[in-house]
Image: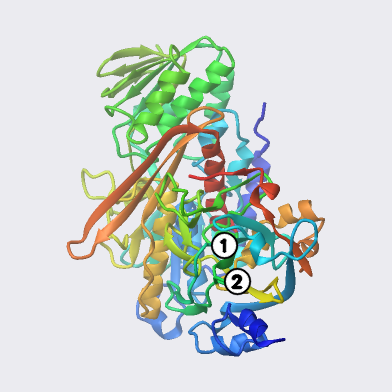
Amino acid sequence: MNRRDVIKSCSMFAVGTMFNLINFEDVLASDSDKGSYKVYKKTLLVKEDGTPLKESDIQPYTAFLFFYPFKSTPCYIINTGHEVKPVEVKLKDGKSYKFAGGIGSKKSIVAYSAICPHQWSYPTKDFSLLNYYSPTEKSETTGKSGVIQCCAHISVFDPTNGGTVLEGPAEFPLAAVVLQEENGNLYAVGILGKDQFNEFFDLYKSDMIEQFGSLEKAKEELDKTVVMEVGKHVKEQIKC
Amino acid sequence: MSKNRLNVNRRDLFIAAASVAASGMLDVSVGAVSDYKDFRSDKKAKIVIVGGGYGGITAAKYVKKQNPETSVILIEKNPFFVSCPMSNHYLGDFYEFSNLCFPYNNLTVKYGVEVINDRVQDIDLDKKIVITPNFKISYDFLILSPGISYDVKEEEKPFFIANPPAFKPGGEHLYLKKLIDEFEGGDIVMTVPAYPYRCPPAPYERAAVLLNYIKKRNIKAKLYFIDANERPVINSEGFMNAYYDLYKGYAEYVTGTYVKGIDAEKKVVKTTNGDFKFDLANVIPPMKASRLIEKIGLLESGQRWVEVETFTFESKVKDVYVIGDSARSFLPKSGFGAHMQGKIVANNITEKLTGKKAKDELLMVLCYSMVSDEEAIMSETSFKIDKATGKIIPIHREDNVRRKSTVKRYNEWARGLWRDLFG
């Protein structure tokens, strides 16, 4: 690993001691909510043809969908087009955690779990109510752009600010997918924030069994995950 | 065509009632009254919730979740939950009744809420005891979420049994659906009381859904839609456009008109704007707080709704809260509003128990309405509080464009609520 690679791999954490993911917990030890980061299997992001996804494949202002950390739990990866700076994400209960900003050459790439933390809507094969609105696309309901918005109960999240809630009934921010860049390849390595996976698997148990054969299979972690245009997985993106 | 799959017979109801009641029997103290100060020392506060609708379930779940050491008892007369939101879908024949029904079991299994299937007869607010035919249950905190009662005269009751308003979920909807399915044509009379009543858009949605029903089946019928209000109280533009565009010739919308009386024998609804003969009637009467609330003296004379503290929903009696459609609130009477109030009260009780300041809940309501079997409209109101003046500023948004995509949002809106209630 050369110096440049080290800088790349550390950019997500915005701190200098991130060679080992376990150390990330140490960093969070200074946070009020120490349990906000969970390490999952290190998963390579690949294109639909199976080759590794590169930064240049993620065009700005477009959300792409992939599954992480489980084969059934959807996430969005977004190139916001500009640097996403580190931020301390504050929760309503007074706790907080550090979101380390974007990765990539412009530090503009971020990823979030696409399970709404309000009442757990998520992009299914039929439709998605939780969608990304580019900076040039204005929500008819909230008038907001450059946001992730759930049209079931109008919760709005800021992808450039750690997934924080801009408006609506969601109690928690979107959980962030922690990304790493190594030798030009992108990896998902963990989840930061209040993930909703327990609720997801509990509430959608029958859907998971129907779709994957068993809950255990739905909870499989992946070595590689395919990053695709949202429309490849979701028939209808419902925006409002 | 989808039909009711529930098929609940008398025996099933009895078994369900008995099993739910049994689950709550062990921890019921008979006649014992806790001293208010005691729970602080042993941290075993007892919270009793009357009414297992949107407000009561939410309050029970969240207060127990936030305070696992407390004893939380939910008393509900029905053996399972039936949702009023989405019930017009069932009446319109594009949703199965069973989709509206949920068991209370998960509240007990997952959260440890004791659910007692019984009817509350009385409450002794001085001794802090809730009285049912089978139990006397003491409490430290009482949350009343009993819903509404119809404000009708005693002699009118047989008419409303034979022609249910279907604004209380369950049997009334099943019976009204039977009447709709047996309707062969003629005049339908539907009436809307003056606002406030339960669920502002519901009568207007029901009118659209009934019109869709008769139009799709080519039933020779006309709907006389008699509204005490001057226009639809919400989504006025969207509803009026739907009535005009989709159902022209099928309906007559008579506004600013009140029901004066009903001649059940002659099948006539008498109004301030003339008499209307009916072959099918859905008279939605004025509503008021539940009779239980009146009985225990929380309803001031001449009032229809209970006065509560604006932001805590605490009644004039300390540690007794009234939430949902019985309370007078800036939040419109709706399942969504009651759900929100349930969270607010749970937070407030947690604050009293722990001394830690509760987090603020967002104050908002979202309403979706079907205008046909394929399209829906929606509205959203959020409430900002000016902390300096205490003034409540509503910010209201409507989407009156009929959209198929809004139907999906509507379905997910309801499923999300149900996930929150029962998940």
Q: Evaluate whether label 2 is on the same chain as label 1.
A: yes
Element under disc 2: loop
Residue at position x 37%, y 34% from top? Answer: B235
Residue A60 placement (x, y as % from top left): 56, 58
Q: Which mark is residue A104?
A: 2
Q: Residue furthest left?
A: B389
Which corner quadrant holds the N terminus of chain B?
Answer: top right
At label 2, the amino acid type is: Gly
At label 1, the amino acid type is: Asn
Q: CA distance from mark 2 to mark 1?
A: 9 Å
Element under disc 1: strand
Residue B60 placement (x, y as % from top left): 48, 63
Q: Is residue B3 left or right of residue A81?
A: right
Q: Which mark is residue B401?
A: none
Residue at position x 38%, y 21% from top? Answer: B225
Pointer 1 chain: A
Residue B39 placement (x, y as % from top left): 41, 79
Mark 2 and 1 residues: CB-CB less than 8 Å, in contact? yes
Front-most of residues B386 and B220:
B386
